Image: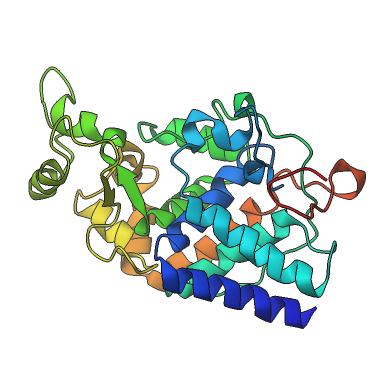
Amino acid sequence: MSHGGIDRRQTVVTKVGQTFTTIPATLRLFFHDCFVEGCDASVMIASPNGDAEKDAEDNLSLAGDGFDTVIKAKEAVEAVCPGVVSCADVLAIAARDVVAQAGGPLFSVELGRRDGLISQASGVTGKLPEPTFNINQLNTMFARNNLSELDMIALSGAHTLGFSHCDRFAKRLYSFSPASTVDPSLNPSYAQQLMAACPQNVDPDIAIDMDPETPRAFDNVYYQNLVAGKGLFTSDDVLFTDSSSQPMVNDFANNPLNFNAAFVTAMRKLGRTGVKIGNEGEIRRDCSAFN
C-alpha cells in the first residue's frame, strides 16, 4: 500500500510541476465535491447527456487540471492495489498534497469514504457559496455541512491560491450601488488594479489572481489582504467588515500558525461531510464513471 502512496504523491508532484493551476484546481474540486452530496467524488462523474454535477453552472469554471490530477493519481493507486481506494479518498488526499506543495501545512487525512452513486447537475443549485454572500448566508451554508463560522473563515483562506473570472466581481467595480459605482469597502488602489485587469466587456476567459500579493503560496496573506481592503469577492470582504468574524480575520492575519491549525481542523471536518460507507457507495475503477 505504501508504494501506492509514493506513486500517487509523485503523480501529484509531477502534475504540479507541469502547471501551477493544479494546486488551486484540486483544492477547489474537493470543496465543490463535499458541499454537494458529501465527499463522494460525485463531481468527477462525466455524463453523455451533460447533466452530471460537473455540468452545473456553478461547476463549469472548475479547471480541468483538478480532474486530471485525481484521475492520474487514482490510476497510480489502481496499478498497485486495484479496487481498494475510492476516488473520494484519492481526491481528499490530492487536496492535502497540493496544499503541502504550495507551502501550506502537511496533515493526515481520514480515509474510508466510498464513491457516491448520484451525480446530478440539478442537485448543485443552492449548495455552493456565492461571491455575493454575506456572513449569515455563508454561516448557514457551512453549518449545513457541520462547519462552524471559524471553519468557514479558515476554509475561505483557500482563496490565497487560485484565480477568478472578472464577471464574478465586476459589480463591485462598475455598478455597486446607485450611490457608489465602486464598492467603497475596496481599497481604492486595488480597485484601480482590478479595473485595469478587468475592463468592462472584457473577454470572459480572462482570469486574475485572488491573492494579489503572494498568489502562488499557501499562506495567511489572504487575511492581511482582507484587513487592507483587498478582498476580491464580497464574500471575502464581509469576513473583515462584519464584527462577528473580524477578530478571527485579525488573528489569522497576524498568526500564520493559528491559521494553519484552523485550516487543517476545518479540512478534516469538511472531509467527513456526507461520507458514504458500505453499500451506500462503491469503489470506482474509473473516477469519471459509475462501475
Q: In the image, residue 99 lies at what x, y percent?
A: 49, 67
Observer able to see residue 265: no
Observer able to see residue 13: yes
The answer to whether 95 appears left or right of 47 in the picture is left
Give the residue at the far top of this rendering. 178
The answer to whether 157 appears left or right of 189 in the picture is right
Q: In the image, residue 34 lies at what x, y percent?
A: 63, 45
Q: In the image, residue 290 lies at what x, y percent?
A: 78, 43
The answer to whether 14 appears left or right of 92 in the picture is left
Residue 137 in the image: above or below residue 71: above
Residue 70 in the image: above or below residue 165: below
- The image's colouring method is rainbow
**Image quadrant of residue 11?**
bottom right
Quadrant occupied by the N terminus = bottom right
Q: Residue at point 51% right, 61% down?
A: 263
**Image quadrant of residue 87?**
bottom right
Q: Nearer the viewer, residue 250 or 105?
A: 105
Q: Residue at point 59% right, 38% down?
A: 143
Residue 34 in the image: above or below residue 213: above
Give the residue at the far front of this rendering. 48
Q: In the image, residue 249 lies at what x, y percent?
A: 35, 55
Q: Residue at point 35% right, 31% down?
A: 132
Q: Nearer the viewer, residue 5 or 81?
A: 81
Give the residue at the far right of this rendering. 279
Q: Nearer the viewer, residue 138 or 95?
A: 95
Count of number-bearing discs: 0
Q: Nearer the viewer, residue 276 or 196?
A: 196
